[in-house]
Image (tube, rainbow, N blue to C red):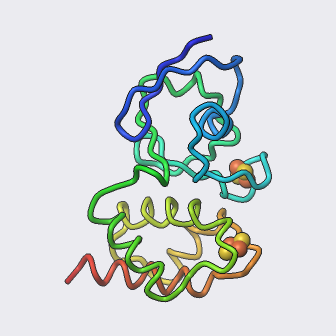
Amino acid sequence: MAVTLTINGEKRTVDAPAGTPLLWVLRDRLGMTGTKYGCGVAQCGACTVHVDRSPTRACVVPHEALEGREITTIEGVAGPVADAVRAAWPAIDVPQCGYCQSGQILAAIALLEKNPTPTDEDIDTQMSGNLCRCATYVRIRQAIHMAAEALRS
Ligand code: FES
Ligand code: FES
């Protein structure tokens, strides 16, 4: 079934079986491997993308349900908040193995777009669905504060 999706501002037509999660359309059909597979059951956040600017688990959303929606992945996320987050992450060496980090970054951008002055508690609450086996949580929190500060200055 051919479906046209809007991904990072571009129309992409894909022909995949109905019910195929967006994650596998991105990775296997379109070669966009920045979005990662972790659990496959919406429990880890590795596959986080934005749909209409909200963080969404690509591993459980059937791709055909997203026709007409605006999908943004780590490859295409842009704007002042994305720039601030992208600058903060390497500034304090947030990643360890890196596997979870595209999902963490997409979640952090969505958080700061809604809440430009998050407290530690806000960050912990909003980011709690994004797991990191390397336990980079403290640096993630620091980087979000750094990005928020940069956006205010
Ligand atoms: S792979 Fe989607 S939430 Fe874990
Ligand atoms: S940096 Fe390794 S899983 Fe998060």
**Splitting the image into 4 quarters, where does residue 63 fall?**
top right
Compared across the picture, whether 122 is left or right of 41 comes to left
Percent from the top left, x then y, of residue 61?
64, 34
Residue 145 vs 113, above or below: the answer is below
Residue 62 vs 132, above or below: the answer is above
Percent from the top left, x then y, of residue 15?
61, 17
**In percent of the image, x 49 and y 87: which residue is there?**
142
Residue 50 vs 116, above or below: the answer is above
- Depth check: give the residue in front, 24 or 67: 24
**In percent of the image, x 59 and y 40: which residue is there?**
31
- Depth check: give the residue in front, 148 or 95: 95
Percent from the top left, x then y, of residue 88?
41, 80
The residue lying furthest to the top in this view is 1
**In percent of the image, x 63 and y 32: which residue is there?**
25
Compared across the picture, whether 97 is left or right of 3 comes to right
Compared across the picture, whether 123 is left or right of 151 comes to right
**In percent of the image, x 69 and y 75: which residue is there?**
97
The residue lying furthest to the front in this view is 31
Residue 139 vs 116, above or below: the answer is below
Percent from the top left, x then y, of residue 131?
70, 68
- Depth check: give the residue in front, 46 or 126: 46
**Splitting the image into 4 quarters, where does residue 17 fall?**
top right
Compared across the picture, whether 151 is left or right of 59 comes to left
- Depth check: give the residue in front, 60 or 87: 87
| Quadrant including the N terminus | top right
| Quadrant including the C terminus | bottom left
